[in-house]
Amino acid sequence: MMLSLVQAEKIMRASPALSVSLTIPLPLASTRTRFSSEPLRFKQHVSNTHFFSRPVRLLSKQPIVRWSFSCQCRNRGRNYSKFDDEGEDFIVVNFYRFVSIQDPAAEIAKHLSFLQDLNIRGRIYLNEQGINAQYSGPSKDALSYVEWLKQDERFSDILVQVSPAIGRHAFPKLKLQNKPSLVQYEGGISHLPLLDPPMRAKPLEPSEWKEKLKDITDGDGEASSSDSGRSCILLDVRNGYEWDVGHFRGARRPEVDCFRNTSFGLSDEKEAPSDPLINVDKEKTDILMYCTGGIRCDVYSTVLRQRGFKNLYTLKGGVSHYLEEEGTSEWVGNLFVFDSRLSLPPAAYNNNTVDEAKITPQTPVDTSFARCYICDSQVHELRHRNCANLDCNLLFLCCAECVVNLKGCCCSDCVTAPRLRPVLHGIKRYEKWHVYRDS
């Protein structure tokens, strides 16, 4: 049913827990952005203090109305064939910034207008707390967006990480959205003091981080004494499967599979006996936190700060920035990345124009720590695969022999599953699950 804005407002007043979706045709003359003939779709959600993706019962008599925006012509039916980028180097760009954005909807409209003629795919999230972006594209387009963004004084000194793409795009499409949380964490992050720099960990330059690592001497991430007599803990604020392909020496493997569930320093010894922050001296222990690009550490450091941890340090720009500046000193293995490449060797960050042959898993790196999920033998290819069982899809490391013996599955039970995908070799990845469901 097509509704006008006036009709929608009447419905929302009568039923405050209702979520209304409007399809509103916009005349091209009314906007600077060029759209296709497909309409724009707005979704209105109502809440007392927060933005919800699902309808909730109001607690306030005067609800706050917010709009989320998605453009069908861009997110669902964008015609990428119009771009002629043959012969151009494709790169992947990552950056984030916690900064106050008073009107995210207006900010998104500005970004959308600039990006409309650029061949960029990826995830660009904005909200009142800032921006978080990971995207791919030909270097000319990808860097044009960065330069345009830096013209805004709020982002003029933003740290941008660039790495080579394998082939062309590392993402299937462009998502430019107003997200309630710039990163997914249990309970959300809108209530965290992320816009207050003293509440976040102190950022260390890669060279400073390298010096700090010398305080970690026992090699297992336990608290160790530095030359100054202080205790020091190296904390990997990533997922366990990321550690499996690469990590700093001395960092303990995190027993989490999703950042949302990270809980270091939040539980007692009975609940989480393996927590490296259990029973540490919050006043005298230096906590060195690292992740891929830095944003997860910034978020989680505010959680620890509220729990009374005083000496929090984070690696500025994350591991990717460190590998670019310091190389592999104190680092072993590859770096897990959340796009179609999955894993990058350190050399990829030393030369952003490196060709595909040099960033494939055959790049010589230390793999002595990596183990097959199935047989526990050493793995030489530091790149995860998904279980061939469509209904499992587990992300795991696997040796070449087990790939063959278990037909690309993670266990014997999955081998006999009714919906098996073909075994993939090399750096190939499975297509979207519905391709195999419908076949």
Image: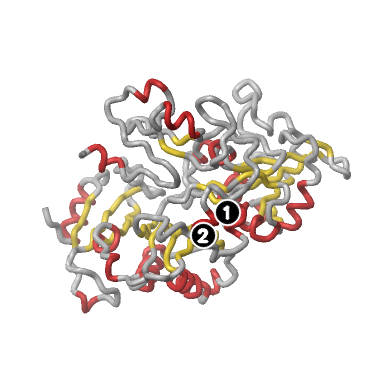
Q: Tell me how far mark 1 sits from mark 2, CA to CA.
A: 8 Å
Residue 85 in the image, given as x and y percentages of width and height: 37, 70
Dot 1, how many residues are within 10 Å of its Cα: few (below 14), some (14-19), or many (20+)? many
On the picture, is 196 further left or further right than 144? Answer: right
- Residue at (87%, 40%) from the top-left corner? 229
As drawn, the label of residue 94 is 2
The kind of secondary structure element at disc 1 is loop
Residue 235 in the image, given as x and y percentages of width and height: 67, 40
- Residue at (38%, 73%) from the top-left corner? 114
Please, which colouring scheme is shown?
secondary structure
Dot 2, how many residues are within 10 Å of its Cα: few (below 14), some (14-19), or many (20+)? many
Whether the residues at callouts 1 and 2 have beta carbons within 8 Å, the answer is yes
Quadrant (top left, top right, bottom left, bottom right) of the C terminus:
top left
Residue 181 in the image, given as x and y percentages of width and height: 45, 50
On the picture, is 250 further left or further right than 54? Answer: right
Q: Amino acid at mark 1?
A: Gly
On the picture, is 10 further left or further right than 379? Answer: left
From the image, tell me which residue sits under label 1: 293
